[in-house]
Image: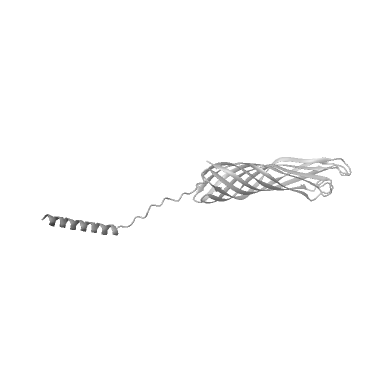
């Protein structure tokens, strides 16, 4: 009898195990849990610094055809000066992110050493142009591909400029000069790419084009037939390529 019970229990256990295996085989298999892919958030403020190279094109012209021009004895046309130099400065800004779209505001100040002196065609006049500093207040917007941001930027530009025309008193009349030193407003636009190599630090490469408003200088300039009241106008365009490093909060 005991042997019969043992056989019966063993048979029942075998049936239960077989049934359990069949049920388990019919159950859906749960997919393994996959951790979400991490992404870089560009939202937040930052401060940084930049260095680069700038080129300027400045022009001096006679305003309304009055008096002498930028080249003494020539009352029309323009005198142009071009220069290139290293530059550097500081910047700050704040970005917001909506999925892959990043937008923000930025401000910067840049010291420059852009200056050039040229002699007029008649050899009687020299024109010196200087851009001492640049500043901008810009918006920017772009697309983030994980830790790299490609963007466009533009806004208000300011520049500290000085322009001087020296009349050398060719053959007569003594020398004189007209000069204008001012802060000029204008606009700036450009594009760039920025890459984050960890949570707090990023490096960027950026191009900016500045157009500053005209400014003028007026005064009395002597000549062979007497002094003439002269009105001159000056304008500046600047192109900048720079690399920057930012610390993000």
Q: Position of residue 113 (x, y in %)?
A: 70, 42
Furthest residue in direction left, as rendered: 1
* 22 over 101 or under it: above or below: below
Residue sitting at x 62%, y 46%:
243
Q: Is residue 67 visible?
A: no
Colour scheme: one colour
Apparent side of residue 90 relative to residue 99 in the rendered image (left or right): right
Q: Position of residue 183 (x, y in %)?
A: 69, 40
Work out whether residue 15 or residue 249 is closer to the camera in this orientation and state it: 15
Q: Is residue 156 visible?
A: yes
Work out whether residue 206 or residue 216 is closer to the camera in this orientation and state it: 206
Work out whether residue 18 or residue 58 is closer to the camera in this orientation and state it: 18
Q: Position of residue 74 (x, y in %)?
A: 83, 49
Q: Position of residue 186 (x, y in %)?
A: 66, 45
Apparent side of residue 200 relative to residue 132 in the rendered image (left or right): left
The N terminus, quarter of image? bottom left
Residue sitting at x 57%, y 43%:
246
């Amino acid at each position: 009898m005991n042997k019969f019970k043992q056989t019966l229990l063993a048979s029942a256990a075998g049936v239960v195990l077989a049934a359990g295996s069949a049920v388990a085989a019919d159950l859906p298999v749960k997919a393994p849990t996959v951790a979400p892919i991490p992404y870089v958030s560009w939202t937040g403020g930052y401060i940084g610094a930049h260095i680069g190279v700038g080129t300027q094109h400045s022009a001096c012209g006679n305003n309304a055809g009055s008096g002498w021009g930028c080249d003494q004895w020539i009352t029309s046309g323009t005198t142009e000066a071009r220069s290139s130099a290293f530059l550097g400065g500081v910047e700050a800004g704040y970005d917001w992110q909506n999925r892959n779209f990043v937008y923000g505001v930025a401000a910067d100040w840049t010291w420059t050493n852009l200056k050039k002196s040229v002699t007029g065609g008649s050899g009687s006049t020299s024109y010196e142009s200087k851009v001492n500093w640049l500043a901008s207040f810009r918006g920017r917007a772009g697309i983030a591909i994980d830790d790299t941001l490609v963007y466009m930027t533009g806004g208000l530009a300011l520049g500290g400029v000085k322009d001087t025309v020296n009349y050398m008193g060719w053959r007569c009349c003594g020398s004189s000069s007209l000069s204008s030193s001012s802060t000029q407003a204008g606009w700036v636009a450009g594009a760039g790419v920025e890459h984050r190599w960890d949570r707090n630090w990023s490096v960027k490469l950026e191009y900016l084009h500045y157009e500053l408003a005209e400014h003028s200088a007026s005064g009395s300039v002597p000549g062979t037939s007497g002094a003439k009241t002269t009105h001159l106008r000056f304008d500046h365009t600047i192109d900048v390529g720079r690399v920057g490093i930012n610390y993000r909060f």
